[in-house]
Image (spheres, helix red, strand yellow):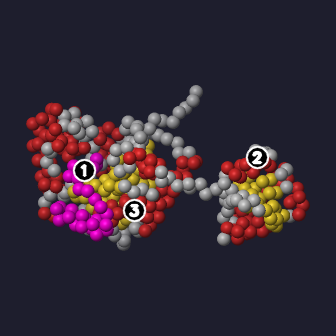
Amino acid sequence: MNINIPRGTQDVLPEQAAHWQYVEDIAREISHKYNYTEIRTPIFEATELFQRGVGDTTDIVQKEMYTFQDRSGRLITLRPEGTAPVVRSYVENKLHGHPQQPLKLYYFGPMFRYERPESGRMRQFYQFGIEAIGSDDPAIDAEVIAMAMDIYEACGLDRLKLVINSLGDKESRTAHKNALISHFSPRIAEFCEDCQARLEQNPLRILDCKVDRDHPLQETAPAILDYLNEDSQRYFEKVQRLLTQMEIPFVIDANLVRGLDYYTNTSFEIMLEEPEFGAITTLTGGGRYEGLIEDLGGPSISGIGFGLSIERLLMALEARGALPDVNRGLDVYLVTVGDVAAEKGAGILRELRAEGLSADKDYLGKKVKAQFKAADRLRAAYTAILGEEELASGMVKLRDMSSGEQEDIPMKRLAAHVRQLQK
């Protein structure tokens, strides 16, 4: 009986993994430029973390989490997003006492959501994310947005559209919440069951409903920007000025609502306007959160971050024709003739690798011609040929695969000689 991969997951094959490593390396490099350091949290956490951190009214908690009981009867959840685990670690390890504040962190890892699988949306997806915790300065918001833009541009994407909004502080959100309840209440029976349940708990989620997105009341719903108090308005205006100062174009969308309960003030999404990719597609999103750290037992401080899907980024690069050829090829492929040469080749390979060179040989007993074909497939820069004649003389024939030129090199000097040729 064949056992197939679970629905909504994928195997990343070797030729694909090279592209994953390419974009991951770019994300790490830009993280370093912005002074972010890596944090690694468990793949599973206590279910309560996401119930409290993400919010009981979200689709993630209500419908999408992979939750199970462990052998001690504790409720455990495979992490559906990265912010709550990072904040949990921040609180538990008392990182608010770290001398460098705000604390700038980045993470990589798989996330899990039980959703209908479709293009760019998997049940296990791989995410890069950042969190800047401990500052209320709007400049951090602008920096986080700039960092996300830099990653996409460094990967080779243009035609990016940045959309921003403000969800306001707690006072502004309360005023907007009351206005939404008054707006939707008279006709709430026309909405789906989820929206009806959200009306009193979190009516902002109604604006993000996929089922009722075309309902006429959605178009006339009160906009959060009309309910920003003076502090929230001033904060949002400064974020806009900073983005303008950085020469980062943006569009304000009062209907931009992020899917997690902890967001306040700045929220944003980056979209790709690419004809080959279809309609305008969201690549990443993020925003500021206040109260989350305190809710999880930490001090009353705020943070901001974003999460970036590696799969969706690679899809965008493919649609853009911007996936680079990242197969570097081998430095040396060792061609051996005979059993004695094959055994001797094991030591030569070790010496080459110890010198920092990538090297390989045949392990299937192939003929010489087939070994050269293998070297071509592996895009080897050089082949080192070892047979009876070379064993007797202590030399190796080194062939430049691009020019075809060949020279005899002492076995003990092979690694150093290839290094010299590379320079």
Residue, disc 3 = 150
| Spatial separation of the CA atoms under disc 1 and disc 3 | 22 Å
Depth check, front residue: 108 or 352: 352
Q: Residue 87, located in which quarter of the rendered image?
A: bottom left
Q: Are marks 2 and 1 in contact (CB under 8 Å)?
A: no
Q: Position of residue 381 (x, y in %)?
A: 69, 59
| Spatial separation of the CA atoms under disc 3 and disc 2 | 45 Å
Q: Residue 235, located in which quarter of the rendered image?
A: bottom left
Q: Which circle's residue, 1 or 3, is located before the other in the chain?
A: 3
Task: Name the residue at 26% across, 56% down.
Answer: 251
Q: Which circle's residue, 3 or 2, is located before the other in the chain?
A: 3
Residue, disc 1 = 256
Depth check, front residue: 256 or 28: 256
Depth check, front residue: 287 or 23: 23
The three-letter code of the residue at mark 2 reads: Ala
User: Does the stretch in magenta take in 256?
Assistant: yes
Q: Position of residue 297 (x, y in %)?
A: 29, 57
Q: Which element type, helix, strand or loop, lies under badge 3? A: helix
Residues drawn in magenta: 232-261
Residue, disc 2 = 370
